[in-house]
Image (cartoon, helix red, strand yellow):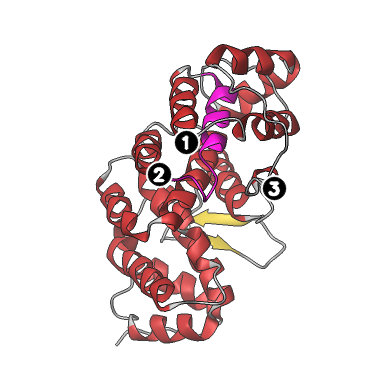
Amino acid sequence: MMARKRGGGHKAQVLRDDGERLSPEEEARLTAELESYVSSDADYEYFAEDEDAGDVLPPPTFEDVIYALEAWKDDGRADQLHTTQGVDRRYIGVAPAGLDDLVAMWRGSMDVEARVDLARALWDSDIFEARLVATRLLFQARLRPDDVAWAMIQGWIFQMDCPALTEAVCKTAAKRVQADAARLDQLELWFDAADDTIRSAAFRVTLPWAKLRNLKDDDIAVQDRILGWVVTFGAEAGPALRLSMSQWLRAYLRHAPERGTAWAQGQVDALAPGVRREIARLLNIELTPS
């Protein structure tokens, strides 16, 4: 299967290599999930690096967080979330702005160890909004030391089961990988997973590198490694992996069309047919294998 987006203003489509489409339900789920992840760099606008916040509140306990979330309870929204996320768990119905305000208030009052401990407890509660808060607590680039946080986030990758939590976990994981590019070694192991959603996370987590403009040598090395994943895993990808790969390539080729063209022409014989057609479409060039 291959992910394709026909024109900037049209909905992305997930197609089989024989041209047949996925079911409307599966296509809608995959495209909505991935396009939500890619569509805006403004996500997490409330999670910029903290400046001096003046008076700092005492760090919240797990009970404090749940109590505060309950204060934003909306049963109608909770029912809607249950329907759209498709997983049976508790939904409180907190609006995104409410989560943003709460996390901004709590984050500055905790050191790294306290954030990690609270995030672990919130995630383990399996409450939808508590899990979202857990990911946001670990989102900042300046989280140091972050080895324990990174280990925990890797565990969350294997527990992603709905669109919103998948998006939140991948964005938080991206910050930790940007902090230490050696963690790409762990991402590469995700391709061994049986779950296509986990395999697709490698491209979602590395999406920031596809959008870089002022590249350093280390950034180019990372991009080249990710492009190697396109060659290695493109032929065996399921729909979620194909779509996340397509989203990564779309961003990369938009920001570096000349490098992308040179790479694609050099790899034309190694690329899976569906991936080669997708790249040719994105670059508006002919890619004919020898």
Distance between the Cα atoms at labels 1 and 3?
Answer: 21 Å
- Asked if residue 124 lies left or right of residue 214, the reply is left
Q: If you read the primary sequence from the N terminus, does the residue marked by circle 1 or circle 3 appear first?
A: 3
Q: Report which residue position mark 1 lands on.
A: 112
Q: Amino acid at mark 2?
A: Pro
**Is 34 above or below relative to 155?**
below
**Disc 3 target residue:** 45
Residue where numbered disc 2 is placed: 145
Query: In the rendering, which numbered label is found on residue 219?
Result: none
- In the figure, residue 97 lies in which quadrant? top right
Residue visible at 55% across and 16% down? 61
Numbered disc in front, either 1 or 3? 1
Left or right of 186? Residue 90 is: right
Q: Which residue range is magenta in the image?
A: 127-144
Q: Position of residue 62 (x, y in %)?
A: 53, 16
Q: Could you tell me how far apart the alpha carbons at marks 1 and 2 are, in whole angstroms?
A: 7 Å
Of residue 8 and residue 74, the one placed in the foreground of this image is: 74
- Label 1 crowd bin: few (<14), some (14–19), many (20+), radius 10 Å: some
Q: Position of residue 227 (x, y in %)?
A: 37, 70
Say if the magenta span includes residue 139. yes
Badge 2: residue crowd in 10 Å (few <14, some 14–19, many ≥20): few
- As drawn, 157 above or below 273: above
Pick whichever of labels 1 and 2 is earlier in the sequence: 1
Q: Quadrant of residue 287?
A: bottom left
- Location of residue 139 with respect to 10 vertically, above or below: above
Q: Secondary structure at mark 3?
A: helix
Inspect the magenta stretch and tell me whether residue 194 lies in it.
no
- In the picture, the quarter occupied by the N terminus is bottom left
**Mark in front: 3 vs 2:** 2
Q: Nearer the viewer, residue 113 or 227?
A: 113
Determine if residue 74 is in view. no
